[in-house]
Image: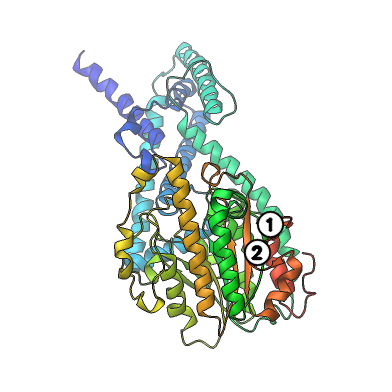
Amino acid sequence: MTRGTVRNALPPALAALVLYLLLVQPNHPAAFTWGALAVFPLELPVILLGLVALGAGTWATAARAALVAALLLIAVLKTADFAMFTSLSRGFNPVADLALVEAGFRLLTGAIGPLPAILSVAGALVALALVAAAAWWATGVWARLPGPDRHLRRGAAAGAILVAGLATAELGHAMGRWSLPLDPPGAAFTARVGVERLQSARATLADLRTFRQAAAEDPLADGDGLLDLIDRDVLIVFVESYGRTSLDTPFFAQLHRTTLARGEDRLSGLGLSMASGLLGSPTQGGQSWLAHATFANGLWIDGQTRYGAALASGRQTLFHLAGRAGFHTAAVMPQITLDWPESEVMGFETILAARDLGYRGRPFNWVTMPDQFTLAALDRRLRDAPDDRPIFAQVATGSSHAPWVPVPDLVAWDEIGDGRVFDAMAEAGDPPDVVWRDRGRVRAQYRLAVDYALRTVLDYAARHADDPPLMIVLGDHQAAGFVALDERPHVPIHVIGPAHLVTRAATWGLAPGLIPAHDTKVVPMNRMRDLILRSYSSGRAPGGES
């Protein structure tokens, strides 16, 4: 091969490399490996042959501009995906998450300072411009290759069509639209990212229209006297993975029903009232935030698209309305260890994430701290703070979250301190990789973990019986089917507090005590916002239909 031949072949090769790197760019941290370079992008031959077929000219220039714009857009979407998976363990929604860009910039500013944040954004824009210039150059190199040779352009067009058909077949196969008899020699990954984001945007826009209509037609949002019948703190306590199986499946119910019955006797003796029932959760096995959002928004949010649409809709959550009614709204979220920009639009005045609760003990594997410490921190940071306003807080427990090992135990509340009293418990027992080899042991640990969570919440209620808050305690979702041995997406709900407030919740279909009746009607969780507002507001008929 002569030096001139090498010189002539080098620009097309470099141009193809530029486009190849754009196409194999990963959108998930787990894919950011050298293995990503080994996946052949089926879009690459389509692009290269298409450029050869177009050649030079006005129309070819316009087509190149559209191609470069599309590649840059998908590269940005992949980068956004990467950032969202890193921080929030989910992909980027191009419609719903646009509202979080400003919040994200504020978080960045708070983390590294205003000037570094501005420089970071400027650097990202410069990098994008350089990528655009490289892509424009690369497409130009291939568009100029055929010169005036019409036969070459026609052959390239035919080849582009054939490979495009193969890429389309692989794309449909990867998205579950159809099956193929043979595995394709590559993947149309970039095209799939584009199609999936387009579908996500369309679905979000459809849901957003529905949610905006619900927000606009929300009579309770403009009501008077909201929540004015409540004369104390309100705690919405989500018990992680607490489902109907705790009441109905003998292996779990034998222990959990006993704990509930003992708790009922104890709390009754202290003068507290209780009522319990069942709710239908929008999720099962995980994604607790969908249950939290459904409860707070009064809308059925059973997936990430609807979650994003709800965030962007302007819907007034239960916490927005409680804040307007004079409560100090808060979220106590011990399992939030990363930035949580969504919280900007949820109605919380104060957010206490893991780093804000003061825990200095050892974590319990994935669980950052025991539930008892979380509830103690709730008192220390919120309920005992010098503020004349009552608290209206969402509290999410964590000890009953998988992997359910090790399980802590209750200690004396005045011995909790900074949490190091739990260190020996955090080191006890077999690690998850041992326990999870046996599904029987997994279920046994789940049984103990939920029981600990229930005992902790009930002990907290007893501790404050002299001046009790209104506590609405509910499960977020049923555990995964292989653990719960029950596929129904139902969760218990308990209302605990003074009689004059608990009786107002009786019209929700609840039964007295802590154990729901066997034939209790399951209430969809999205009805809870309006039921609470109607039951505890002087301007609304208690227990009215939502």
Counting residues from the start of the chain, the first of labels 1 and 2 encountered is 1
Kind of residue sitting beneath label 2? Arg
Kind of residue sitting beneath label 1? Phe
Residue 348 sits in which quadrant?
Answer: bottom right
Q: Is residue 312 above or below residue 272?
A: above
Residue 315 is labelled as 2
Which residue is found at the position 46% from the left and 78% from the top? 379
Tell me how the rendering is colored.
Answer: rainbow
Residue 165, position in %: x, y? 54, 20
Give the side of residue 77 with respect to residue 211, left or right. left
Label 2 SS: loop
Label 1 SS: helix
Question: Disc 1 vs disc 2: Cβ atoms closer than 8 Å?
Answer: yes
Query: Is disc 2 surrounded by few (<14), some (14 to 19) or many (20+) residues within 10 Å?
Result: many
Which residue is found at the position 38% from the left and 32% from the top? 19
Q: Is residue 513 above or below residue 79?
A: below
Residue 211 is labelled as 1
